[in-house]
Image: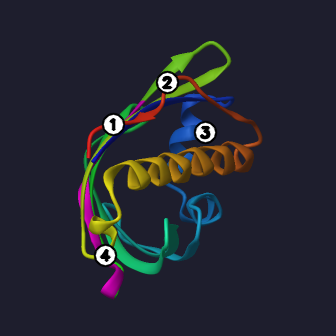
């Protein structure tokens, strides 16, 4: 599955960057987040409750940051397990650029999903992933005191 998009956040780049690296802001922004902790500057662990189609599961996972260029971009690899519901793993890249009205956040994500979730079907998983991403950016922008405007987001291939 691939998920790509752009969001305009009504805040300056340094504030957006700081928010994306602030565990408290992330905890309030990630839909279904139950627990999040920074293990090191490059590693974050989280527990998140997701409902995708008929499957509802609590995922425990980790996120590893790499290629970090402060206030500009970073890459992430992630993996999570939802027990009997399945697993997800993949990579994502986030880039920040100055734009009229705030910061343009561009993201690309490639993920593979297995277990019961893998049996649901690509369209439903892609639609659910897009909704989770949109919800995240709306909550994130609110935490920063602004709003998020989806410019070009879409779920594509499985």
* Residue 131 image point, x, y percent: 55, 49
In this view, the mark in front (1 or 3): 1
Circle 1 sits on which residue?
A: 156
* Residue 84 image point, x, y percent: 32, 87
Circle 3 sits on which residue?
A: 15
Label 3 close to label 2 by CB (< 8 Å): no
* Residue 113 image point, x, y percent: 26, 63
* Residue 59 image point, x, y percent: 41, 77
Could you tell me if residue 63 is visible in this image?
Answer: yes
Q: CA distance from mark 4 to mark 3?
A: 38 Å
Q: Quadrant of residue 144?
A: top right
Q: CA distance from mark 1 to mark 2?
A: 12 Å
- Residue 38 or residue 136, whichever sits in front: 136
Q: Earlier in the sequence, mark 4 or mark 1?
A: 4
Circle 2 sits on which residue?
A: 152
Residue at horizontal 48 percent and vertical 31 percent from the top? 153
Mark 3, secondary structure of its residue:
helix
């Amino acid at each position: 599955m691939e998920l790509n998009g752009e969001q305009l956040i009504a805040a300056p780049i340094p504030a957006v960057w700081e928010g994306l690296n602030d565990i408290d802001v992330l905890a309030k922004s990630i839909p279904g987040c139950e627990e999040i902790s920074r293990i090191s500057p490059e590693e974050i662990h989280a527990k998140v409750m997701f409902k995708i189609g008929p499957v509802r599961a609590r995922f425990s996972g980790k996120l590893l940051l790499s290629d970090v260029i402060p206030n500009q971009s970073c890459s992430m690899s992630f993996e999570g397990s939802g027990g009997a519901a399945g697993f997800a793993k993949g990579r994502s890249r986030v880039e920040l650029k100055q734009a009229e009205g705030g910061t343009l956040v561009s993201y690309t994500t490639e993920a593979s999903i297995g277990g019961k979730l893998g049996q649901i079907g690509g369209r439903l998983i892609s639609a659910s992933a897009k909704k989770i991403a949109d919800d995240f950016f709306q909550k994130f922008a609110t935490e920063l005191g602004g709003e998020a405007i989806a410019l070009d987001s879409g779920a594509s291939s499985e």
